[in-house]
């Protein structure tokens, strides 16, 4: 899972703490660290329907959790549930 956010966002800082406490593995993309990271996030934000209400409400849309199956969440608890399902299924023995 990719987590788009920034270290200066209180919601992101809270998310980092919860994810760490739960032992969730993620790739953090700090949108304030480089222009490339910001452009990557803005491309996602400008082209995904999940961001329509976020933009309409004047929000940034972080923390933003992106999964390899193209699912996006803004809610940390939902991201943790999805991550747990993925980790569980990857540990199942092959048929």
Image (cartoon, rainbow, N blue to C red):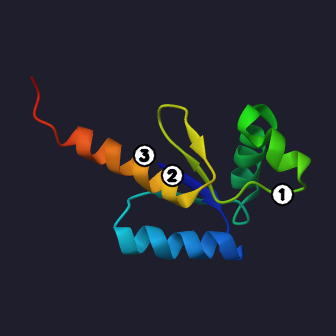
Question: What secondary structure is marked by label 3?
Answer: helix
Q: x, y percentage for residue 3?
A: 56, 55
Whole-angstrom CA distance, mark 2 to mark 1, is 19 Å
User: In terms of image quadrants, where is residue 59?
Assistant: bottom right
**Dots 1, 3 in contact, CB < 8 A:** no
Residue that appears at 33% across and 44% down? 85
- 14 or 45, nearer to the observer: 14
Identify the disc placed on residue 59.
1
Which residue is the site of mark 3?
82
Residue that appears at 38% across and 75% down? 21
Q: Residues within 10 Å of mark 2 (few under 14, many from 20)?
A: few
Whole-angstrom CA distance, mark 1 to mark 3, is 23 Å
**Dots 3, 2 in contact, CB < 8 A:** yes
Question: What secondary structure is marked by label 2?
Answer: helix
Which residue is the site of mark 2?
78
Q: State whether residue 33 is above or below residue 45.
A: below
């Amino acid at each position: 899972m990719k987590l788009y956010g920034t270290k200066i966002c209180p919601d992101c800082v809270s998310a980092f703490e919860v994810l760490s406490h739960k032992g969730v593995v993620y790739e953090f993309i700090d949108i304030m660290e480089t222009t490339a990271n910001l452009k990557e996030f803005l491309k996602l934000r400008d082209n995904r329907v999940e961001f329509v209400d976020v933009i309409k409400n004047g929000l940034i849309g972080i923390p933003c959790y992106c999964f390899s199956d193209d699912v996006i969440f803004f809610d940390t608890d939902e991201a943790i549930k999805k991550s747990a399902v993925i980790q569980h299924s990857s540990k199942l023995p092959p048929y």
